[in-house]
Amino acid sequence: MASKLLGTPDVKLAQGDKTQDVAYYQLVAGGTNFLIEGICPAKFRQDRENLERGGEGFAEFLPTKVWQIEGEGKKKLLWSFGRLSDRPDAKAYLNDHVDAEGVPIEPVIIYSTGGHDDLLLDVIPIVDLPKILFSLDENGKPVRSGGRKMVPLIAMKFDIAERLNLKPVLLPLEKRFDDMQNAAAREATREASKREQEARDLAAAAKREERELRRQKLMRRTEVIAFTAEGNRRKGTPVTETATEREWESLPKGHPCILVTSYNDETKEVGAPVQYFIVKKRDGGGAPKKHEPVAVTAERPVGQSSATKVLRIAGVMMKDEPEQVTLVQDFAAVKALKAAGLNSGTFVGVPEDGKVHVYALAGDEIKDRGLHPEF
């Protein structure tokens, strides 16, 4: 059984011996951040480097510890590997999160013998770990309390075994529960679980389709040209962003963008350019970021000074409405931006007394809009 962790920046290798590496894998499940320590064969590093070069690679990842990340520099140990007393040859695995057909599976730790029989002995949903207490019974055998109830846990074991082509083996307590649970009730539980999975699959497919439609819509826009303060020419897709929506996040990694004050998809009218940047995305997911953003204007500046330096793009509440405001260091910079070509109602602000003094650049005027809080 192999875990598909290669190419994920969150997998960080530590110094290991000649036969294995130690890796740390970050996972978000159920709204909780987890850090998973695991052991990988030395081949893991070679396969990962191959994937980063555009090839393919998989490596066995054997989890040894799981922590809950509680804050900056704080973590709580939730689970550490201990052999099952009745199957000393068992190993713990982290599932791929997808089955053979690419359908998502809830992240779980799997106890399996591996080898010829491929027996599935136990499953522990990772999202349940903060609610589980691990201890020893009166005979010194490992037991756990809390977490998911036994009946749905048994149904999950059968479901995962079927998806991953393993043979499920019921633990003694699970066997007693299963004997009491009639086949019809168990099948009903599995069907309900299947319907929930299908609903999640449909929602995920709809979200992917919506994201693809947004991407195609943006890619059809005609690129615009703008200039940096040094007079360097920049070209990219015009995009907008508000407090609740950032269009450029739908574009592919490495795509050049020019942030503009507005864009009308019907008339194709483009507002004033504000910033140029490249879309940066991690292979393993996470929020997209702007790579090397730089302030730009519609016209090539002549003899520009440092007064035109843009501090950042901020969100400001004006009359109970969120607005995008370009922040500069002083009023001289406001006038410099207007001279550079910002004159279509663009909001420019100067930090003042913990708030933002906002000005509207419209036509030949610089209109004072007063002090407003930043959010």
Image (cartoon, rainbow, N blue to C red):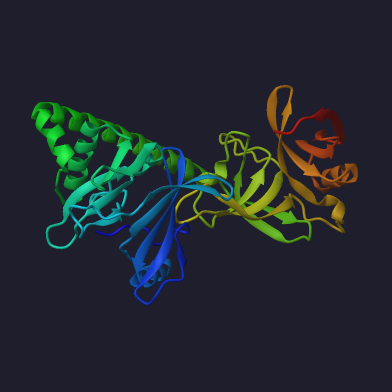
Residue 7 x %, y %: 42, 61
| Residue 74 in sight in this render | yes
Residue 60 found in image quarter: bottom left
Quarter in which the C terminus is drawn? top right
Residue for point 83% across, 29% down: 371
Residue found at the very far right of the displayed protein: 332
Q: Nearer the viewer, residue 187 or 283?
A: 187
Query: Looking at the picture, how far across and down is residue 163, in whole percent?
Result: 20, 47
Horizontal side of residue 85 vs 131, given as left or right: left
Residue 92 pos. (x, y %): 28, 55
Q: Is residue 54 visible?
A: no
Q: Residue at x 73, y 55 (%)?
A: 227
Give left or right: position of 158 versus 138. Answer: left
Q: Nearer the viewer, residue 240 or 168?
A: 168
**Image height of 103 relative to 10, above or below:** above
Asked which quadrant contains residue 4, the reply is bottom left
Quadrant placement of the N terminus: bottom left
Residue 160: percent from left, percent from top: 22, 45
Of residues 221 and 205, which is closer to you in this image?
Answer: 205
Q: Is residue 39 above or below residue 335?
A: below
Residue lying at 17% horizontally and 43% vertically, measured from the top left: 171
Counting every numbered tag in the picture gives 0
